[in-house]
Every structure is written in C-alpha cells, then in structure tokens.
Image (cartoon, rainbow, N blue to C red):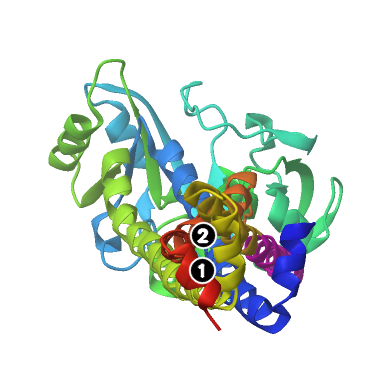
Amino acid sequence: MRLLRQLARRKLRTALTILGITIGIWALVVFSSMANKINALVEGGSQYFAGKVLVFDASSLGVAIGTAPMKLEIADQIRQLDGVAASAPQVQLVYDPEGGGVFGSAETLLGSLAGADKGLETFPINAVQGRLITLEDEGSAVVVLGSDLARKEKASVGTKLKIRGVEFEVVGILEPTLTAPDSTAFMPLEASQRLFHASLPAPIQEAIAADQLIDQVVVYPDKGVSESDLAARIETSVDNVSTLTGAQFDEQVGSATAIFNAIIIGVAIISLVVGGLSVINTMAMSVAERTREIGIKRAIGGSRGRIIRELVVEAGVIGFIGGLVGLGLGALVVVLGNEIGRDSGTVLFDLTPGTAIFAVAFSTILGILAGVIPAWSAARLDPVEALRYE
C-alpha cells in the first residue's frame, strides 16, 4: 500500500508513464496475436506437406500452385514409378471465386478420392459432427466443411448449401485445427471435377471430359525414400509437371513469416525505447523530489541496497500495471476483431497464454531495468548533501 501511495503522489506523471508502456504492450499483444495465427497456418502447412510430394502442372508456377488443369492419367503414371507408395489425385479450387481470404487462409474446396492415400496421410482431420467423405460418396453431391467455413455459412449436418452454383448436402463438420482445413470444403473427387470443368474456358471443356480432370497429385514415398529424390524422379519421368516437397514449402513461406516476425521484434524494441525512457524520466524526477527523504533514510542507517530495492520495485510496479492495461486493451482488440470477422470466416488473431504472460513479464522487466539507473544514482547520494537539498 505504501508503494501505491508513493505512485499516487505523482498521479499525472505516473499515469503518463503507464500510458507509454501500455501503448507499446498493446501493440505487442495485437501484432503477436496476428503472428500466432499466421505461424499456426504455416505450421499446419508444414505438417501437411511433411513426408509427401505435391505434383502440379508446370504452368502453375508464378501464378498459383495447382490452378492449371492436369489429366487424371498423370496420377497413374506417377503411381508406377519406383519409390511411390501411393498417388492421390485431387482438385483444389477457390471456394467462392467472388470472395477471397487473408494470410493464406483463403476459403477453398478440395476434392479427393477417399482411400487413395492408402492410409499414409498423417495430417489429423476429424469430424466433430457427422462424418468424413468416403469412397461410397463418389457420384454424390455431399460436402464436409471446416469449422470456420461452417460458421460462416451457418451450416450444420443436413444443411443444403450452394457451392459454385451446385447444391451440396453437408454431411460433416470438422473440429477446429487452427489452420487451412478450418476454411476448406471437402468433397468427393467426381463432384470437384465437375466444378473444375465448369470453371474452365469453353475450348478446354470441349477438349477434355470432366472425369479426366485434376489439378494436383499428392504423392507418398515408400519407406526410406527421400522426398527430394522422389520429386526429382517425378519431374524427370513425367512431362510438364513441377513438384513441391515439405522442405521447399518451409523455405518458401519461411521468408514471409520471418519478415512479419521481424515486425514484432520492431514493435517490442519501440515499446522498450518509449516505455523505458518514460520510466527513467519518472523515476529520475521521483529521486529529485525525494532527495531529502532519501537523505534521511541514509542518515538513520538505510543501506544503499535498500534504497535501490525500493526504487526498482516501484519502477517494476509501474511496468507491471502498464503491462496489465496494455494486455487488457490488446485482448479487447483481439476479441472484437475475431468476432467481427468470425461470421465471414476470417479469424485474424490467436492470443495464447504464452503471449499474455510474455507481454506482462516483458513490461515488468522493462520497468525494473529502466528503474536501475535512477535507483543507483539515488543510492550514491551523500546523506549530508541530500539533507541540505531544497
């Protein structure tokens, strides 16, 4: 209580110092929560691509992977190569050609042949309602929705939903994964082939039947076979295709996430400079105002260590309060931002307990460090000179 009374003696100055720390921590919490969401998406992509090779038409390079049509027979060619355990043909399209997504979370539809992976797929996808797509669904207009997409469409099991002008019945809702499947609609391969065929220019539609169309193949290597070696073998053996391995995915997206994480570090440095200078200024003024008080404490036997502890703890409390207020404001922005975007399936932030603890700890340590210099100066005051100070 005595410590709080000391801070209350300089209400405006203390409030402004806390405000300086609060702004920095508020920005740190918001940007870190955004980075958490991006990193979760990237981590999900890394988990998905790990241990497999994605094959797509070479003309997709420089545009968007998997956007150019391929013939289904390519999946059969790849399946015959040495080192291939399974070859799963797929169609992946933008869910709504009129819409879009952010931070790699664009809503998509994915058509695949159930069981084509021969049980080698390790990325966990589970239904929280209904069921997943089965081989028996081929020829049917059914769909399984990711959690965010289901929320956006206000859909549940049994809901009739129009996707690209075709009516589908929702047979399952996935449990949240905090990554790409949350904004994906999964359907039988045949249904996705028809949608893909309808989206192509008329000359291409006339040249190839819908049931022969795909836009990517997921290849699972045999045990002990290197993904990079298999990718090179595929590109050599199959005409006009390119490949993407897990290592290449990590390399491509790693640079982008590194840039954003650098922004977070920049925010932290700014908060350190602004908040630290505010605390140093406040504590220096406090020492000047309390010079006689400090002199009295020294004259009656107060040690330098005790003076330093009192002032450093005071500075730490300022940092702690600023961190709590900044965390509260940041959490408010995160909650409101997610709620505003939730109906459209756009969840931008992920405020984790680790981020919250780090923010408060960071501001407290910042206050303590910034209070060391004024505290050390106060402890070195000569008691006699301090008592004469006006």
Residues under numbered marks 1 and 2 in contact, where contact means CB atoms less than 8 Å apart:
yes
Secondary structure under the numbered disc 1 in the rendered image: helix
Tag 2: amino acid: Leu
Q: Quadrant where the N terminus lies?
A: bottom right
Decide: is 6 above or below 109: below
Prevailing secondary structure class for the magenta stretch in the rendered image: helix
Q: Is residue 169 left or right of residue 163?
A: right
**Rendering coords of residue 122 (x, y %):** 49, 27
Can residue 322 be found in the magenta stretch? Answer: yes
Tell me how far mark 1 sits from mark 2, CA to CA. 10 Å
Q: Quadrant where the C terminus lies?
A: bottom right
**Rendering coords of residue 124 (x, y %):** 58, 31
Residue at numbered disc 2: 93
Q: Is residue 46 among what the camera can see?
A: yes
- Dot 2, how many residues are within 10 Å of its Cα: few (below 14), some (14-19), or many (20+)? many
- Which is nearer the N-term, disc 1 or disc 2? 2
Q: Is residue 264 left or right of residue 184?
A: left
Bounds of the magenta span? 321-346
Tag 1: amino acid: Ser
Decide: is 315 above or below 302: below
Q: Residue at x 32, y 46 (%)?
A: 250
Residue at numbered disc 1: 199
**Rendering coords of residue 389 (x, y %):** 52, 79
